[in-house]
Image (cartoon, rainbow, N blue to C red):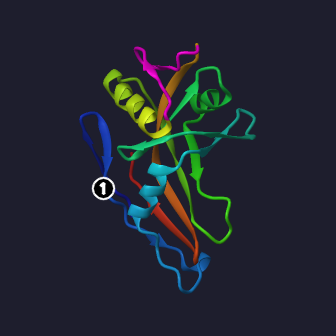
Amino acid sequence: MGVAGYTLRGRQMMIEPTPEFHAGFSEPTAAAAPWADVERILGSAEIFWLSTVRPDSRPHVTPLPAVWDGGALHICTGNQEQKAANLRRNPHCALSAGTDKLHDGTDVVVEGHVERITDHARLVELAALWKARHDWNYRVLDDTFDDGAGHIGLVFAVRPVKVLAFGKKPHSQTRYRFNNS
């Protein structure tokens, strides 16, 4: 099932999606992960793994902090970095977060597409969130972040198309679909 988003002051807000529990990949005692639990993981994770595709179709995976806000994960990368080049060419990507434990916690994978954030007011909001959540000090330029050490960062919002939650105690799989067209 898809959900439609609506715009509020330039931010994409989302209505809670309906979970699709996959019993075939879950233990008999498992249940669908509540969306509130998945959002809590997205909002509290310190590191995500970003997966993009290089021009020759090889994968590129790298860790980076992200900020969940307004129904999207926000990432920052230098204009000359491989992930920026990959996202310019192909806006589809995946971000994942979770634990390294086999029988504890929940892993979450967000599949979506990026859009560059250039609105100055929105960048100011996001810089404040990066400071509050990751203690990173970004100064907002016209349409980028500046880290104060000479690194200019492009900011992207990754809007979910599909989110997967993999519970580990008991093992479960829940899928959420989004309508972001």
For the magenta stretch, what is the residue range? Answer: 135-149
Given residues 170 and 181, the one toward you in this image is 170
Quadrant for the N terminus in the image? bottom left
What residue sits 45% from the left and 40% below the top? 133
Q: Where residue 78 appears, x then y in whole percent?
A: 59, 23
Query: Left of 9 or right of it: where is 23?
Result: right
Q: Is residue 82 above or below residue 53?
A: above
Residue 48 belongs to magenta span: no
Given residues 65 and 28, the one toward you in this image is 65
Q: Secondary structure at mark 1?
A: loop
| Residue 168, quarter of the rendered image | bottom right
Predominant SS of the magenta segment? loop
What residue sits 62% from the left and 58% below the top? 99
Residue 143 belongs to magenta span: yes
What residue sits 45% from the left and 34% below the top? 130
Farthest-out residue, bottom: 28
Query: Left of 104 or right of it: where is 66?
Result: left
Q: Amino acid at mark 1?
A: Ile
| Residue 159, quarter of the rendered image | top left
Q: Where residue 117 appears, x then y in whole percent?
A: 42, 28
Q: Is residue 98 above or below residue 93?
A: below
